[in-house]
Image (spheres, rainbow, N blue to C red):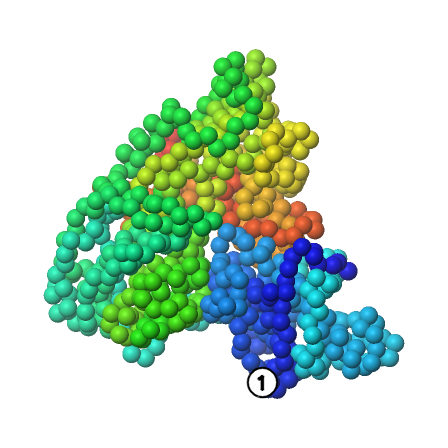
Amino acid sequence: MTLVDKKLNRRSFLKVSTLAGGGMMLSFSWLAGCKPTPEEVLTMPKEWFELNSYIKIGENGAVTLFNPNPEFGSNVKTSLPMILADELDVEWKNVFVEQADFYPERFDRQFTGGSQGIRSGWMPLRTAGATARQLIVNAAAQTWNVPAEEISTNAGFVEHQTSGKRASYGEMASLAGTLEAPDPETVKLKDISDFKIIGNSKKNVDGTKIVTGKPMFGIDHKVEGMKYAAIVQPPAFGMQLKSFDKSSVTSMPGIQDAFEVKIFKDDYGRNFFDTTTFPTIIAIVGNSTWEVMQAKKNLKAEWEEAPDSTFPMAGRGGQNMDIKVPGGLENSETHKVKMAEYISKPGNVLRKDGDPEGAFKKAAKVLERTYTAPFLAHNTMEPMNCFADVKGDKAVIYGPTQAPELIRQTIAASLGIPQENIQINLARMGGGFGRRAYSHHMTEAALISQKIQAPVKMVYTREDDMSAGVYRPTYSATYRAALDDNNNLLALHVKAGGIPESPIHANRFPAGAIDNYLAEGWQIESNITIGAFRAPRSNFIAGAEQSFLDELAEEMGKDPIEFRLELLKRAETNPVGENNDYDPKRYAGVLELVREKSNWSNVPAGISRGVSAYFCHNSYVAEVVDITIKDKQPVVENVYAAVDCGIVVNPDAAANMGEGAIVDGIGNAFYGEMAFENGAPTKRNFDTYRMIRHKEAPKKIEVHFVQNNEAPTGLGEPLFPPVFAALGNSLYKATGKRLYEQPFQPQLLEMENLKM
């Protein structure tokens, strides 16, 4: 048995109380769960208490737990309760789950993002399950008058082998609820080798509901007397509302009202996720979605250029800062010119090891390459939407959000009511990718409901979301390598920035593996709103870094994988600096595994192969992409991925998530691009914003996991960044031309030997 780490204080989330009508309920502050199909579960208890943040054990042994985390496809509703059920030692089929609404008083972290769900829940869930199991054992010991150490558990039953006594958890649950909870620091966890559920694949518990179209999403929600709302935003970034003619729409069928909505009060200090494209919009309210969307087309409004502005924001870590929003109408071509100017300008030094300037002065050869990537739109399958019902000083909000705690304070400030009077009910999200961490759509819906004094559902059109979105920034990175006469690497210099942030992670590989290393960053202010996009910053810098390392390996006459392994060996045995934020041995492990699984050195005839590896969100990933050229078009045949994310709780779900990230990355690498002309996005829907098609997905994807006993780390994002470079490197092998600008498709179209 393994003792819980005493450095982790869990008393704050453990509490035991007795359920009326029998049964035990164990409270803890960070928990998620699942609900099997009716055919898989026990007959329900006669009484079932639906209380948030509790494990409940009914008198028949059934277990229910509330899932606090919003679900948007990462499968936490299945994987997190697997952890709990394993330590509790119950049968998986007897576990129920219900989606908890937002209750910060009972949950520490009701946030989905950063690939931290399993990682953050690992110890709390294990401890909660083990504590509940110990309480059941103690109740049996008291009932049978035997030592607790002589009692064992198995599949929801307690047993005393000497006396032959056996009982279900349900039979002991009521008494267990009266006992004092054991000290969490002394609770014994299972040995990893004793896991029965963790590591064995379980199907998505919401799968049947999803494929049969059950109402699970915010966009499905309806109540009696509900009104419908649409919003109208400025046609371009850098513009604001001047005036509008209300009568141009209020005479239309089914339209109730049209009015201006100001999202923030003048004295409100925003939090980090209060990114709002346009702080003032127009709302149109009517009797149906169709009618308000028709009215949008008919609305007569005047817009004007917005001046420079500044607003206060609390950054990550609580640091206050002033955000400057420049006026003017921006253009992508101007962006490119501005970013190119920074190649020759000094940047902000983020890390410096050794004497990189001296190394470059005495270099026999310098390899220099610049990589760029455009803005990207999130394009979640389900557009932004929210239901709100504001009555007096109380509000009920229902909709998709990744960060309910952060938006509640905004809603409270905008409505002028106490936070504790706002109930946010969590819908399943039809996609997130970071977009729904910015939940201004909830504030908008709440303000509309407050204005009309009625429940309302507000729905964005695809054009609303795509043309006034929260985008992945546009980036540029320049890499330089100094080589001596024998092609030995002397120094490496990276200078990277973007509009309006830099993508640099200064302490990641290859920092720590090179004696002379310099990392610089820069950024250019913009009025185009940006935000977290799957694997923020990593989604660009990984592609640039790993493409450059491939080209550098070729220049040095080395195999791409061997070159990376040499650098990692140096970082392991004789690291440079003290702030390297990766484990070089684990990093090398995924490269070695992908080399084995792809049969790297034996490339099949007609296949062009590229490799890439990256560390982010506490996990290590290496990928190999195989392409062929058919009918003058690149076809992605195979992708091999090796992942070290620690213990894999739900292997099939983990592999599925990896496959999705790979397909998403390939699509964005080939086609993803948002451009701007005079502040206006040039693409407003899928007829012009190119997404990957089914037939363009890889023919085969293999996701292999390193087997170890490390605690779980991130998975939703880490497989996304490496695929950009792996694809680019394979395209180079196929065409003989390096690709330095994303998306790749326009450059491929220009190639004489590859007409698409």
The amino acid beneath tag 1 is Glu
Query: Quarter of the image containing the N terminus?
Result: bottom right
Extreme-right residue of the structure: 162
Q: Is residue 470 above or below residue 40?
A: above
Q: Is residue 657 above or below residue 552?
A: below
Q: Classify residue 604 by image quadrant.
A: top right
Query: Quarter of the image containing the C terminus?
Result: top left
At 54% from the left edge and 36% from the top edge, which residue is drawn? 507
Q: Position of residue 631 (x, y in %)?
A: 43, 38
Q: Is residue 146 above or below residue 576?
A: below
Q: Is residue 382 visible?
A: no
At 52% from the left edge and 58% from the top edge, which residue is drawn? 74
Q: Residues within 10 Å of mark 1 (few under 14, many from 20)?
A: few
Q: Is residue 664 above or below residue 614?
A: below
Q: Position of residue 65 (x, y in %)?
A: 58, 71
At 56% from the left edge and 80% from the top edge, which residue is drawn? 49
